[in-house]
Image: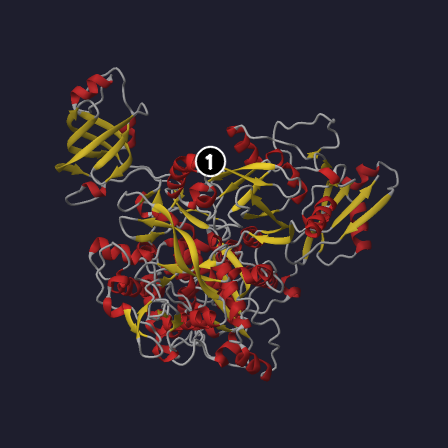
Amino acid sequence: MTQRERYNPQAIESKWQARWDNDELYRSKVDWSKPKYYALTMLPYPSGDLHIGHWFAMTPSDARARFKRMQGFNVLFPMGFDAFGLPAENAAVQRGIHPAKWTHANMERMRKQLRSMGAMFDWEREAASCEPEYYKWTQWFFKKFYESGLAYRSEALVNWSPTLQTVLANEQVIDGKDERTGQPVIQKMLTQWFFRMTKYADELLLYTNIDWPEPIRMMQSNWIGRSEGARVVFHTETGNHPIEIFTTRPDTLWGATFMVLAPEHDLVKQIVPAEHQEAVQAYIDAAARQTELERTSDDRDKTGVFTGAYAINPVNGERIPIWIADYVLITYGTGAIMAVPAHDERDFAFARKYGLEIRPVIRPDDAGDDFCVDAAYSGAGQMINSGRFDGTFSNGDKGRKNGAISAVIDWISGQGYGREAINYRLRDWLISRQRYWGAPIPMVYRADGSVEPVADQDLPAQLPDDVVMSGIGNPLANHEGFVNAKDSSGQPARRETDTMDTFMCSSWYWFRYLSPKKSDAAFDAEEAAYWLPVDVYTGGAEHATMHLLYARFFTKSMRDLGMFEEAADIMQAHGRDPQAAFDEPFMLLRNQGQILGEEREGHYIRAHGQWDSNTKLFADQVNVISKEEALDVDPVALSHITGEFASVAEEQMSGSVMGEIVKRTENIVTVRDSKGELKTVEVRANAEINIPDIPGENTVNQLKHHLEIQRMSKSKGNVVNPDDWVNKVGADTVRAYLMFGFDWTKGGPWDSQGIEGPARWLRDVWDIVTAGAPANAQGEADAERALERRVHQTIYKVGTDLENFSFNTTVAALMTLKNDLKTALREPGKIGAAAWTDAVKTMLLLMAPITPHIAEELWERIGQPYSVHLQAFPIYDAAKAADDMTTLIVMKNGKPVDRVDVSANIGEQEAIAAAMETNGAKRALNGGQPKRVIFVPGRNEGQKSEPKVNIVV
């Protein structure tokens, strides 16, 4: 007997990847005779290596794109790189490597890793945002936005590093200091470029015609934060300076007992009397050292300082003090608030802290005339202490739905005190970045101070290569060749040195995929007419309020600027309705969960050396030992061989530590001993290290520390490198495990043992198929019918679950079908060659989206035409999937009392008759008659269920 060939994924996967590339199997071209399907998954940042999280997002998305292709769609599934960003600049400063060189090297490495997935990416459509032919059009979009009034300059509060002379992102500021230098960071007003995103606030709250997860819609709606209310103008007592505020509760205007301005408010310097200036300026300086996130944190103690000035409340003429506080931001609303401590938690805490008046103006119905507040009250009640509006009922609703609010808005409008208004939490998009590695903003400043865009023929305004990356300031601002430009009249001008937020580049990349090499337009109109809009977009939910919101704004802006008009005409000419085709970027959005690092025990060690002041052991020798040896400690015994000692003192005398490594930073390890106590060990440079499982000379870097289940990061040492697993078990096994081992929408901890299940499945499939068809032409009818039934049930399950992104149940169904075939192999003669071949063909077609390489290889080996990925998805036949027999559940008053096997297509009368003949029914009736008998038919598709007969007695 000859030994069958074993499954060798590394050999077949590289072979088929090369063949697919050579044949351009996944090249997507416009074909108006076929229905299109634009499948998109979020493009990666080229940080250096793909991690398993990339695979978890991309390979299931690839499986579903393949499935849609097998359904007859012409599928576009492109890939590219979001290649600008701060990490490249950090690498330039820290490693002395140019950002472009670092980025391109990373992209090349990641291309190879992406190809190892076996995904159906159309690499002819690759786009990288750092290439001049890409950011030329990023700049062109900026220019069009500027010309239409969507782009403008204004001041904004930023995190400014005086040491680095640059603006820092919030995540670069730790405890008020720059994360790199540890030097203080201040808040500073700088002139910046913005996009008028708030123009689309109301439209961004609508999700008409798109299928997006409710949590994403909720996060975006909360981020936009539409509030109905009124703008009311107070005036300062001295100077009569207007202070405009927005309030959602104009019915509480009479309860305003003080006002609060942002420390940066222009009015502060005008109203503070001399005796208060020192205290106010000290507070302003302190606020400048806090980031916006720190200032608005809910759990942060609110602070403020009295300005010495007063304002007049327009509704009652009262004189109220004006304070400044850092929780009021100049960039939100008007930078000023009226404080109503009786009915706002934040104002209440502030008033209590500083001894300010708390005056209730809404009294609950169940409260007496002497109502006073011990905590802020925000519910419904009668207006009190409110002049002409005393007794008016405020029902607790927002806006005009609240009669009290509506009445007050009408009154203050008539009096000229204010007006009805809508406010948004959403702010205009600040796109300026004082960095090198980004798309330069294509504007120049003329000698007269005016600003104008770079001419189209001069785009792109290209990044110079010869910059000095010192980490201090913006390299572009110090590059004379870049800064010195000519205006449209040929006169000397200064070029804008800010670059654009990298979210700008990722707000339109799917349009560039349509025609990445096109030099005379951002995208080809014919391609746009055919492929747009994107049919499905997959990626992380963490992008809800940034990228996904920016993408929607960008698409709507492009629509309103007429950028899709030619595409709409072409679309209409081909019989497709362009109505609403360009209102939203992505029709269907689905988000994957997150793969977490798996729990791992650290090495158990015995370290020998000398103690330093009884706090740290300097180890000359570290031996990795078994867990049992490390923890099986006799607290009484002393052993100079094992190093186990009865007391801390004796242990310190011994110069020995034994236990599990729970943390390692370079050559410093923390060890938890058998008593649970933590000991610090510094491994000397020349220490002898012995790790039995790792041959050769061992180093401290090979010592493993304990890992908890937590988010993967390089600093925690728990990142799973997919390349290692591809080399070990093959790409198909990694793909299958990622789809089988997790609920795709939730994710979970990586399990290096759990991957064996999918590996065993593919080995079994290989053995089953390569064993060949049975020798007998005919099999037993009942056995073949049972196999046919399971095959069609699997077709239904796989098709339904792939459509619904339920990848784990898809793979589970395929594993079950494999088991059915494996069982049939053990019963020679029951399945004939033709039935067997049909079942195997169907199984391979169903596997093709999940495990493309092994499906292709085995498809060829059973003599089928190339390629399995050009075949149609198997056709489901409900009749063939139906069970011949089923179990009828007999119930008494809703509780099962018996079961009986019946025909799967049994009717109501036959089912009732069969139920009544069971012993359970006879016991339930006890010789009597039922009040009612209810028949519930079973279901063969979807969530299958047995038929039921309920006897009501």
Label 1 sits on residue: 304
Identified at 64% across, 28% down, the residue is 373
Question: Residue placed farthest to the front in the image?
Answer: 239
Question: Residue placed farthest to the left in the image?
Answer: 686
- Image quadrant containing the N terminus: bottom left
Identified at 50% across, 62% down, the residue is 196
Q: Quadrant of residue 597?
A: top left
505 or 884: nearer the viewer: 505
Left or right of 793: which side holds 50? left
* Placement of 261 over or under 581, stated as above or below: above
Left or right of 810: which side holds 139? left
Residue 232 coordinates in the image, percent (x, y)? 61, 48
Left or right of 785: which side holds 658? left
- Image quadrant containing the C terminus: top right
Left or right of 881: which side holds 851? left
Question: Residue placed farthest to the bottom in the image?
Answer: 573
